[in-house]
Amino acid sequence: MFIHSILFSKNIFRFFLPVLSVSLLICCNSNPQFATSTEEEKKAITQVSAARAKAFNDENAAGIAIHFTEDAFLMAPGKPALRGREAVRSYYQSIFDIYTPFLESHYEEVVVSGDVGYGRGFAKVTLVPDAGGDTLYSTSKYINIMQKQKDGTWKTTHDIWNDNE
């Protein structure tokens, strides 16, 4: 009888351990203060992208950078990866110092999983040199990886794109 009890309790343990583990993961990873639907989160991420695009068209480098985490990565084509909000601001300011920009962009897909999400999109950029010369045109595909912050806002942790040309 004693052996039967041990075998039975091990089988119960084998059954309940996975159930307990999954339950703990769900409970520990949820933040009821910011509990919202996936659709609301997707909308919030899309709004961040729209705010960044508006800031780009307004030549507002700080307005772009504010939507990045302090340790974010910016991975522009043909350039080394930049890290940090200030590096993001500086990168965009260097563009605005010599060009008048026009950007059309939109997400084609937004995915959210807990406090992490991404937007995959398409962009069309026109840069008109302030000093005259040839206007630059490009289209690109991009991915923004986003992370929900403690205050409930979404910030970009990684921004990468490459040209279609």
Image (cartoon, helix red, strand yellow):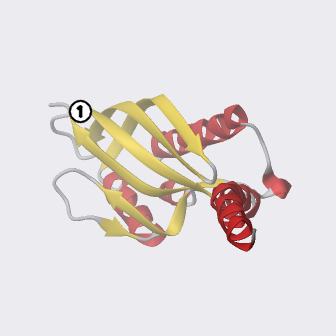
> Is 12 placed above or below 49 here?
below
* Quadrant assignment, res 138: top left
**Left or right relative to 6: residue 124:** left
Q: Secondary structure at mark 1?
A: strand
Residue toward you, 81 or 10 = 10
Furthest-front residue in view? 1
- Outermost residue toward the right in this view: 33
Image quadrant of residue 73? bottom left
Nearest the viewer among 1 and 114 is: 1
Residue at 27% of width from left, 53% of height from top? 76
Indicate the amino acid at tag 1.
Ser
Residue appearing at x 66%, y 55% in the figure:
15
- The answer to whether residue 149 shows anywhere in this view is no
Q: Which residue is mark 1?
A: 138
For the question of whether residue 140 can be seen, the reply is yes
| Foreground residue among 123 and 89 | 123
Measured as percent of width and height from the top left, residue 55 is found at: 53, 46
Report x, y in % for residue 127: 29, 38
Q: Position of residue 163 (x, y in %)?
A: 21, 37
Q: Is residue 46 above or below residue 67?
A: above
Q: Residue at x 80, y 48 (%)?
A: 35
Q: Residue at x 34, y 56 (%)?
A: 97
Q: Is residue 111 left or right of residue 17?
A: left
Residue 16 left/right relative to 66: right
- Number of dots carrying numbers: 1
Residue 66 in the image, given as x and y percentages of width and height? 57, 60
Q: Which quarter shows the C terminus?
A: top left
Quadrant into which the N terminus falls = bottom right
Q: Residues within 10 Å of mark 1 (few under 14, many from 20)?
A: some
Residue 144 vs residue 62, the one in the foreground: 144
